[in-house]
Every structure is written in structure tokens, then in C-alpha cells.
Image (cartoon, rainbow, N blue to C red):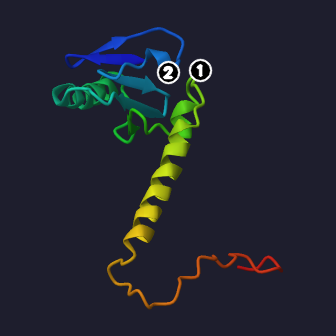
């Protein structure tokens, strides 16, 4: 892992845990064929730009192909692939619950409002059942 400070990469030889990621910095995670740039939520715009430049320089210095995949990850939006690179990443249900809670709140607001653009109050109820993708015989 490398941290990006003032446009310079600083190698940090440490165990990969979520706790090393600071929300005011950008970090470069080298996974061989793929590079991840993790961006803290409160990182300054100049630091974010410097991180992009530093990654490009890193690719050139390491003689990596120009087709090396670089994935930018924003704090709080880490996917499973990124998290799997770490020895320790705390499992929380807060992120999943907040997404469900948010959908529920939007649905409740729409029901409360009663009239949605394009729908009249007298229109029949929408069938919320989703037909199965596969028939009983396994055919699409």
C-alpha cells in the first residue's frame, strides 16, 4: 500500500487492514494486474488530482502496461473485491440497512403523497409480482 501525500507516493509496508485508511488521504493498492486508488471522503480536491497523477507515474516507473486496470474506490463504496484484499475488514450491517431504510422511506413518502407524475388516483394497482426468469423445465 502506498499513501499519496502532496502528490508523492509513500510506501507503507504494513498489514492491510481497514484501519490504515484515513479519510483525509488517498491510497494506492497494488494488486499486480490491477491497481486500486482508495479516496477518503474528506480528501481535498488537489490531493485527489495528485493521486491520479501519482498513479500514472507509478505505472510508468514500474514498467506496467498502459492497459493496467486502475479502479478508483470512494470511502464507503468499497466493493467485495476491494475488501477481499485486506486481512481485516469489519463486517457491518449498517450500510445494507441504511440502503433498505432509504428505499422504505421513499416508498412511504410516495404512498403518503398519493399522486405520482404519470399516475392517476383512479389507476389500477401495479402488480408488484415479478414473473420467474426460468420456466419449470429450465428453459429461458
Disc 1 and disc 2 in contact, CB within 8 angstroms: yes
**Which residue, given by chain and number where applicable, does mark 2 sit on?**
18
Query: Is tag 1's residue or tag 2's residue first in the polypeptide sequence?
Result: 2
Q: Secondary structure at mark 2?
A: helix
In terms of image quadrants, where is residue 39? Answer: top left
Task: Please tell me which residue is depicted at 56% across the width and 27% down the height of the picture.
Answer: 85
* 138 vs 97: above or below: below
Task: Please tell me which residue is depicted at 40% across the width and 39% down the height of the picture.
Answer: 71
How many marks on residues? 2
Report crowding for label 1: few under 14, some 14 to 19, many 20 or more residues within 10 A (C-alpha).
Answer: few
**Which residue, given by chain and number where applicable, does mark 1 sit on?**
88
Give residue 62's position: percent from left, percent from top: 36, 23
Q: Secondary structure at mark 1?
A: loop
Task: Please tell me which residue is depicted at 73% across the width and 76% down the height of the picture.
Answer: 134
**Residue situated in front as seen by the camera: 92 or 60:** 92
Quarter holding the C terminus is bottom right
In terms of image quadrants, where is residue 133? Answer: bottom right
Mark 1–mark 2 Cα distance, whole angstroms, equals 6 Å
**Label ID, residue 99:** none
Give residue 75's position: percent from left, percent from top: 39, 32
Report crowding for label 2: few under 14, some 14 to 19, many 20 or more residues within 10 A (C-alpha).
Answer: few
Give residue 33's position: percent from left, percent from top: 48, 34
* 1 vs 56: above or below: above
Amino acid at each position: 500500500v502506498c499513501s499519496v501525500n502532496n502528490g508523492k507516493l509513500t510506501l507503507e509496508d504494513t498489514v492491510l487492514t481497514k484501519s490504515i485508511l484515513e479519510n483525509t488521504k488517498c491510497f494506492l493498492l497494488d494488486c499486480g494486474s490491477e491497481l486500486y486508488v482508495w479516496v477518503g471522503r474528506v480528501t481535498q480536491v488537489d490531493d485527489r488530482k495528485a493521486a491520479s497523477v501519482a498513479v500514472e507515474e507509478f505505472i510508468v516507473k514500474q514498467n506496467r502496461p498502459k492497459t493496467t486496470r486502475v479502479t478508483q474506490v470512494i470511502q464507503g463504496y468499497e466493493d467485495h473485491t476491494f475488501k477481499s484484499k485486506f486481512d481485516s475488514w469489519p463486517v457491518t450491517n449498517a450500510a445494507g440497512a441504511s440502503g433498505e431504510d432509504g428505499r422504505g422511506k421513499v416508498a412511504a413518502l410516495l404512498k403518503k403523497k398519493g399522486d405520482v407524475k404519470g399516475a392517476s388516483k383512479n389507476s389500477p394497482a401495479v402488480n408488484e409480482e415479478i414473473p420467474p426468469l426460468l420456466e419449470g423445465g429450465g428453459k429461458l
